[in-house]
Image (cartoon, rainbow, N blue to C red):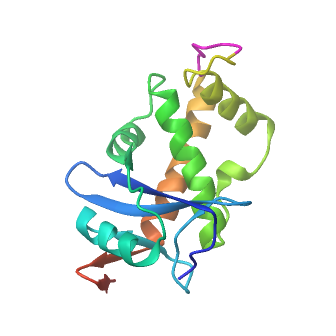
Amino acid sequence: MHLAGDNYYAIRLDFKFYQWYIIWISDEIDGVLVNDDHKIIAFKTEVGLKQFWQKNISYADTEITNYNVYQLQQWLIDPYSEFDCNEFLNLWNLFTDISESIKLQFIGDVKNENRDSVYEKLFNGSDGYWAEDPAPVFNDEEINALADVMQNGIDLLLNNASVIENEKILP
């Protein structure tokens, strides 16, 4: 287990009918809590997360940030141009941190003109005061690129997690 970093944050990954709880670590290079095999440590319950937190993390702040993964999964079934840019940007950035932690490549981190355009539009559409275009329009090519990036991120998450239930790691 790798608990290296300055700040820890609890994240709920909401899959609609079940949740996983993971720990995001802010450091020089951001990441998530992984085991020695570079698998994401995911807790099946909030109670399990909080028990681990109390035992292993030195400060008491366990406010939980929610990510609606089920909305992304639904969108991936039939990608369309209307979605929450802020939610997708947050997930993209989380997938980048997951990729760093599990030591596998995330295609969202591979720079190219189309990818950069999609990321910039997500950034602009994410309710920031800095936005050049706060209501970006995505063309079909960009929607397809975004779908590929997000599917890759979901795959990295789902295929590289060790779920802990009642102190037991499930396969």
Is 5 situated above or below 131? below
Q: Residue at x 59, y 16 (%)?
A: 137
Q: Residue furthest left?
A: 17
Seen from this angle, which residue lies furthest front?
59
Q: How many marks?
A: 0
Viewed as shown, does residue 109 lie left or right of 59? Answer: right
Q: Looking at the picture, how far across and down is residue 55, in whole percent?
A: 38, 78
Q: Is residue 150 above or below residue 101?
A: above
Q: Is residue 168 magenta?
A: no
Horizontal side of residue 66 vs 93, given as left or right: left
Q: Nearer the viewer, residue 113 or 22?
A: 22
Q: Quadrant of residue 99?
A: bottom right
In this view, the residue in front, 10 or 86, is 10
- Residue drawn at x 31%, y 67% is 50
Left/right placement of residue 24 relative to residue 11 reads right
Q: Nearer the viewer, residue 55 or 125?
A: 55
- Quarter of the image where one finds residue 28: bottom right
Q: Residue at x 67, y 34 (%)?
A: 119
Question: Which stretch is magenta?
Answer: 132-138
Q: Is residue 125 above or below residue 133?
A: below
**Residue at (56% x, 25% y) in the render:** 126
Give the percent coordinates (x, y) of residue 149: 59, 47
| Dominant SS type (magenta) | loop
Tell me where residue 98 appears, x and y as whole percent. 57, 62
Percent x, y for residue 139? Answer: 60, 22
- Quadrant of the rendering where the C terminus is positioned: bottom left
